[in-house]
Image (spheres, helix red, strand yellow):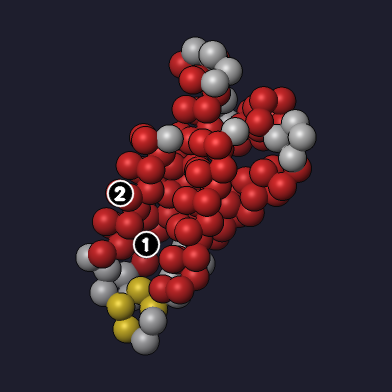
Amino acid sequence: MKEALRYLNNAREILKSVPIEDNTYTDIKPVREAFSTAYLAVLEAINEYLGTKRGLTKKELPKSVDAYRDALRKHIAVHDGRLMREFEKLYDALHIAGYYRGLIYDVDMVKDALKAAKAFIEKIGQE
């Protein structure tokens, strides 16, 4: 999960330069970029797992969110539906609310989302 954690660290680095007032990021553009990078970290963790533990080639890796859901169901979350729920929550928070719509800019909420991404990546790494 080395590459996935690298992406997540990049997301944290992006946030370090964003001005904060009253526990709120005042420049939403880099916050959205950080969310995008954190979401890519989650996808990279899944890719790493599928490549190293399941032997999928780069060409066989998922190419859409639905394909990632299918891969999780088939290869990773077979016995544990919690991982699927966590992926869905991260998709909604990181990709949709954080990146796509730019709705999350509270410092604590951003940090919580990144912590959740890290926990997910670590769980995938233990599978």
- Please indicate, yes or no, whether residue 86 appears anywhere in the rendered image: yes
Residue found at the far bottom of this picture: 22
Residue at image position (26%, 64%) is 16
Q: Is residue 122 above or below residue 72?
A: below
Which of pointers 1 and 2 indicates the residue nearer the eye? 2
Picture quarter with the N terminus: top left
Q: Is residue 105 above or below residue 46?
A: below
Picture quarter with the C terminus: top right
Q: CA distance from mark 1 to mark 2?
A: 12 Å
**Residues at circles 1 and 2 in contact by the CB criterion of under 8 Å:** no
Q: Is residue 8 above or below residue 68?
A: below
**Residue type at tag 2:** Asn
User: What is the x, y in percent for residue 99?
Assistant: 46, 55
User: What is the x, y in percent for residue 18?
Assistant: 27, 68
Mark 1 sits on what residue?
A: 31
Going from the N terminus, do you reach mark 1 or mark 2 first?
A: 2
**Residue type at tag 1:** Val
Whether residue 85 sits left or right of residue 40 in the image: it is: right
Pick the front one: 60 or 99: 60
- Residue 19 lies in what quarter of the image? bottom left
Residue at image position (70%, 35%) is 77
Residue found at the far left of this picture: 17
Residue at image position (50%, 43%) is 121
- What mark, if any, has residue 10 been given in the picture? 2
Q: Callout 1: helix, strand or loop?
A: helix
- Please indicate, yes or no, whether residue 100 appears anywhere in the rendered image: no
Mark 1 burial class by Cα count in 10 Å: few <14, some 14-19, many 20+ = many
